Amino acid sequence: MSHKMPDTYTGPVRILDTNGVLLTVGGAELEEMAGGDSWGGTLRLIANAGVAGKALRVRLQIPDRGTGEAALHPRPDRDGVAVSAVAGIGPSPL
């Protein structure tokens, strides 16, 4: 029996509203959880960006991979960088 290794991604992402309108860009560290049924990770962007510090439902667009819907949960800023936890909603874009 073979098991699929979880997919991961580290790099730039576009943050879109749920209608597909570009809000901002950032950097992400994302991974599928074991079993591939869920995905999530961390998003970093400039602390003064419009989505910084807000709990939002967005779409994350990953270059050459796809787009997935996610909930952003703000965490404390670090040295001028806004940090949000990412909880994937639905199919993984990885």
Image: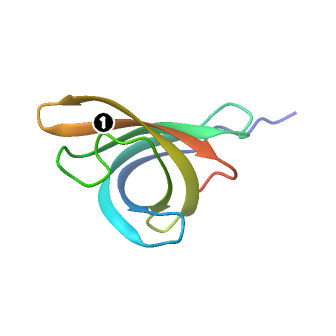
Query: Is residue 94 shown to the viewer in this render?
Result: no
Q: Position of residue 62 (x, y in %)?
A: 46, 61
Query: Is residue 92 shown to the viewer in this render?
Result: yes
Please indicate whether residue 66 sits to the left or right of residue 74 in the image. right
Q: Residue at x 48, y 68 (%)?
A: 64
Q: Position of residue 65 (x, y in %)?
A: 53, 64
Which of the two residues, 76 or 92, is positioned nearer the viewer here?
A: 76
Furthest toward the right, the residue is 1
Q: Tell me the quarter of the picture where residue 74 sits.
A: top left
Q: Is the residue 12 above or below the residue 87 in the image?
A: below
Which of the two residues, 13 or 94, is positioned nearer the viewer here?
A: 13
Q: Residue at x 54, y 64 (%)?
A: 18
Which amino acid is tagged 1? Val
**Colour setting:** rainbow
Q: Is the residue 16 above or below the residue 36 in the image?
A: below
Please indicate whether residue 17 sits to the left or right of residue 69 in the image. left
Q: Which residue is mark 1?
A: 83
Q: Position of residue 3 (x, y in %)?
A: 77, 35
Q: Tell me the quarter of the picture where residue 77 sits.
A: top left
Mark 1 residue element = strand
Q: Residue at x 59, y 44 (%)?
A: 88
Looking at the rendering, in which quadrant would you find the N terminus?
Answer: top right
Q: Residue at x 69, y 53 (%)?
A: 91
Q: Tell me the quarter of the picture where residue 72 sits.
A: top left
Q: Is the residue 69 above or below the residue 2 in the image?
A: below
